[in-house]
Amino acid sequence: MSDMVIDIVDTRKRYRGGVQALRGVSLQVPRGGIFGLLGPNGAGKSTLVKILVSIVRPNHCSGTMLGAPIGHKPTLARVGYLPEHARFPEYLKGAEVIRYVAGLADIPRKDAAMKAEHLLEMVGMQDWGKRKMGTYSKGMKQRIGLAQALVNNPEIVFLDEPTDGVDPQGRLEMRHLLRRMRDEGRTVFINSHLLGELEMICDGVAIMDKGEIVEQGTIAQLTEKSRRYELVTRGTLSDGLLSRLKAQGVELRHEAGQNLMSVCGSDPEPVQPILDALRAEGVIIIEMRELRQSLEELFMQSVGAGGVGGSYQGSTPPSLPRKEVVK
Amino acid sequence: MRQVLTILWDSYRLLAAKKLFWIALFLTVLIALMYASVGFTPEGISMLFGAYEIKNDIIVEGSMFAEYFYMMIFTDYLVPWWLGLFALVLALISVCPVFPDFLKTGSIDVAISKPMSRLTLFLVKYLGSLLFVAIQVLVFCLIVFVAHGVRLDAWNFEVFWAVLLLTFVFSLIYSVAVLVAVLTKSTLFSLLVALLVWAVTLSVQWTESLMYKATYVMPAAGVSINVETGGTRRSNQEFDENADMVRFYEIVRKVGIPLPKTRDATYLLKKKVSVRGNDMTMMTAFLDDDASSGDRREAVAMEAYDNRHSTAYIVGSSLGFEVFILGIACWVFVRKDF
């Protein structure tokens, strides 16, 4: 069995009207994890997912999903999908929607009934399963959407903006659900704009911009280059110490009467001689912290700023959050 | 098969959720019950389960004419007008949103991402929409069947041909609505275009029918029209057809060849149902023994009129139209990016 559930190369899609949605996308998604696909509006994320689930036909796509060529219909029996802005028939009840989708996935009726019951409980909708979809809130519909995506016991689940319209408590529960799905051995593929949420749960991410993958890997891999240690000290530093610190590659700046020293790299070993030198000079070390870019900053750096397909209006200004603090 | 049944069952639930379906069904049952309330006595015709009676010498209990009259109301009035026109319009209004709603983003995605071919999905969804008419006509025919059995002791299963024929007629118009829906995703536009195509085909069929009567039936029956006064004169002998009229009729007939034969297909029922072994187009079989030669000539001419198009021509040309329209719709649906 291949380690990659998705392994595609040179995926291209040009819509009628000339819009080039994908410009040779290559993507590898490992089995059994939560994978996030990020990108600004119009980057081509939804087009890519729609190609993988046969909703959109690519102009070119080499590679496989679950070991079969892209567009192979029988393979979709092993795939779950929750589209963005999913609409389900308003005349159906929650449980009926799940059973309907089960029928489309060719699941026997008895199994479908049992699965519907189980999934309703799993998404916290067991008390609402016998009410019509028309009476549901947006968040409830989204939960039913998640349940229907799991009805065929899929190996890979595509979720397009799964927390859209879900309240904070619902989002928390959704995250638990996603982790549970991963623990069950499924691969969860999420398209989302909510970078903070993805950062909390994703094992790997890819960032798309203007129809291309601009970054791909685990969050640790992608932020590796930005990792550094920062030391905060108080008091005056002697000229000798300053020149030694500079010789060791330490960047120094002063802020609010404090000295901020920055050492690039994720290895703490080069920091030790600096600490020794500071202590030898009697400098008071207030704080030492390991820093890396947030997913949002990585995203902003990757996609830059521009028009559609190249702009992202971040909800928070870039900052360097502390991953770990040593006092 | 499970996937097909799932879509069909969902189609039924979709219809059952529509108020218009139940309103149309209520009216259908009401009209069928009105029909069933007509009976025959030794003195004539009884209405509303015996509440009223119309005296008649010929149409009486046990006579062939009573059976013919009862069946004629069904084939010439109820089927073409209620089921074949008003109920079909209600069905079209009710079913037109099915494809545009299905094709909306977020709705189509779930169905298409399942392990089922787009072709199957499209065709089953289309067939499922025809349930509206099939159910309405089936209920109507059941009541008519029982009425015939109870009133005339004639358990005539041939009345159920109406289910097949009217569902076929509806499918001809609905195929146009589906094509427009697949191209535009607009309910209103698909309804309007379907109604327009229906109106055009009906106009051509009515014109062809009138032209045939004027060109062939009237001369054969010895009836002539005074063009200046508009009056008719009946002669004891038949006339030759007017060459200009024949030419004009041929043009109209040829225009109608590629169009769906909604009206003609509805009237095919007359060929499919029979009374005492004679189908409803065999006018001469239902003549009185002492009918005049003029009446006999007219009956022969009307028989020729009712049989001027073969079943193969009506069904074949209509089916050709439907396959063409549906083929384009299907091709677009299968290739479309949603």
Image (cartoon, coloured by chain):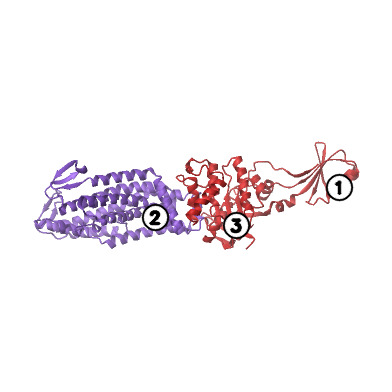
Chain colours: A red, B purple
The location of residue A136, given as percent across then percent down, is 51, 41
Relative to A167, residue B65 above or below: below
Which circle, 2 or 1, is nearer the viewer?
2
Q: Tag 1, which secondary structure?
A: helix
The location of residue B134, given as percent across then percent down, is 34, 52
* Count of numbered circles in the view: 3
* Same chain letter for marks 2 and 3: no
What residue type is disc 1 on? Answer: Ile
Instruction: Sort mark 1 into few (<14), some (14-19) or many (20+) by Cα contacts within 10 Å.
Output: some
Residue depicted at 20% across the width and 52% down the height: B152
Q: Of the numbered discs in the image, which one, if any, rests on residue B268?
A: none
Residue depicted at 34% across the width and 49% down the height: B195
Q: Of the numbered discs in the image, which one, if any, rests on residue A274?
A: 1
The location of residue A106, given as percent across then percent down, is 49, 57
Label 3 vs label 1: CA separation?
A: 47 Å
Q: Tag 3, which secondary structure?
A: strand
Q: Give the residue at the far top of this rendering.
A: A256
Q: Of the numbered discs in the image, which one, if any, rests on residue B127?
A: 2
Query: Would you name the residue on which mark 3 appears?
Result: A23
